[in-house]
Amino acid sequence: MNFKTLILLSLILLGGICTGCDRFLDVQPKDQYTEKQLLATRGGYYTAMNGLYNNLTSNSLYGKNLSYELIDVISKRYAPLAKSTYLTSLNSWGYAEENVSKALESTWATAYTTILNCNVILENLATQQGILSPAETNLMKGELLALRAFLHFDMLRLFGPIYKEDPSAPSIPYNESVKIMNLPLLSADSIVHNKIMRDLDEAEKLLAKDPVIPEGPMASALEDENEVYLRYRQLRMNYYAVLALKARVYLYAGEKDKALQAAYKLLKDKTVSEWFPPVDPNKLLANNVDPDRVFSTEVLMGIYMKKRGDIYTYSFDAENAGNNFLQPRNSFVDGNLFAGETQDYRYQSQWAQATSIGVTGHIFTKYKAIQDGDAKLFYSSFMPLIRLSEMYYIAAECEPKVSDGNSWLNQIRTLRGLPEITITDENELMSKLRIEYLREFWGEGQIFFMYKRLFVNILNTENGHNTSTYGASAARYVPPMPAKEIENR
């Protein structure tokens, strides 16, 4: 079956004139268009792009499975549920259980469908002339290549082998085609160096004139709807997000020198700190009405979730979540996660003492709705995918000298309201960094990937499920590819 006649029918057109961010990404199904019809105009191209970014918000990807639920559950973030559900099987890495395997299959299928969409738009950009300006073509091509690399990388991190143990092991297919076909499983090393880094290097060049560099995120609308396409750069795979993604990939591959240099490009660029300033504690902690709990000013790239508050309501609010209520074990947040450092801005803004009848401990509030958020504030519907803070952690881990790594860790601690600490031992530094990952990326999907990359045990002091230590193993850290994918080989 030729992909061109199938996949683009799923892309949806922009609705009428809206306000704020809704004008950019709040799309409603209106009609079905063929590829030729959709990509015949400038607006059609941007509609197709919006369809791609909306795919990222699906439950199968970063709207659920790869952010706060499936991926966090298998990193042992949450206590056992009151009643047995598919999350119970996930908690024990029961990947063969029917509903778990269906969830994993959905994540795989949605990721590769989105990748196919990227490829079709890329092909049309290469063959059609005059619809977009050369500058717009470069910008769009850069975003598409980066998105393709980003999605493949997360499929590699989730379904691929333990890279640290065997980078030459077969991993996943890398799709650069516009047709639905069986593709060979490439080695993890080949995926990283011959595919992902190639796409990211090209994306970096194409995005060299990204508006985010001279103008910043531009997280507001303009009266001219024709110009809204180039705004909201935090909701696009922008130039700075590509630099950060390269640092993330190099770290995954164990190439610390390259990861460090990639992180430096962001950490030592004064423009980056100007456009993505640290969260302001005065606005955050004194604000009980509409606090920016996701620290949106520091996010290099994220997704637009209009009903983000539903995540809190149906997963983290004890009164409404029912059998899906997600909460770490009773004493974990105070006793282990923050261990007395309750002045931490993340503790004060993203966690709250449980008040519901029969519920004790702390509940996770990062995605709790804010008053009048949808109408006024960009961050009310924002979920992070790539944070600037990750570059501090990468630099801390990759510096040859422990003292220099300690310095980067202290910089991020200062930004979180914590005192500096002195570390002289590499093992202690890594222990502190692991706790930092738990504090910083809870609900964002990065914690499991940290454990798998390092191939380390989930210690009892890091385990939000119970007080056991769970040993690192391929059986736990490598979910199987979908059965249909395996059968077709």
Image: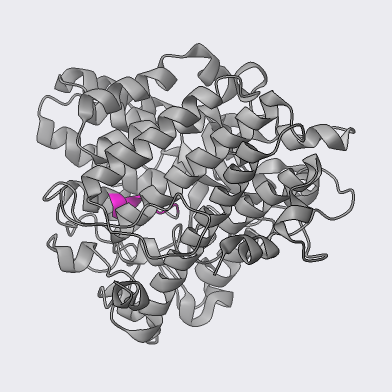
Residue 458, placed above or below residue 386 = below
Q: Position of residue 37 (x, y in %)?
A: 79, 55
Quadrant location of the N terminus?
A: bottom right
Left/right placement of residue 376 relative to residue 66 reads right
Quadrant location of the C terminus?
A: bottom left
Magenta residues (range): 444-449
Q: Can residue 238 be seen?
A: yes
Left/right placement of residue 272 relative to residue 464 reads right
Q: Which residue is pictured at 52% across the width and 61% down the height? A: 113
Main secondary structure type of the part rendered in magenta: helix
Q: Which residue is pictured at 77% across the width and 35% down the height? A: 131
Residue 445: in magenta span = yes
Q: Position of residue 280 (x, y in %)?
A: 57, 29
Query: Would you identify the image quadrant in which residue 12 lies?
Result: bottom right
Residue 10, placed above or below residue 234 = below
Residue 164, placed above or below residue 5 = above
Nearer to me, 157 or 347: 157
Q: Can residue 237 be seen?
A: no
Q: Which residue is pictured at 15% across the width and 20% down the height? A: 400
Nearer to me, 12 or 82: 12
Left/right placement of residue 308 relative to residue 223 reads left
Q: Which residue is pictured at 24% across the width and 55% down the height? A: 462
Residue 246: in magenta span = no
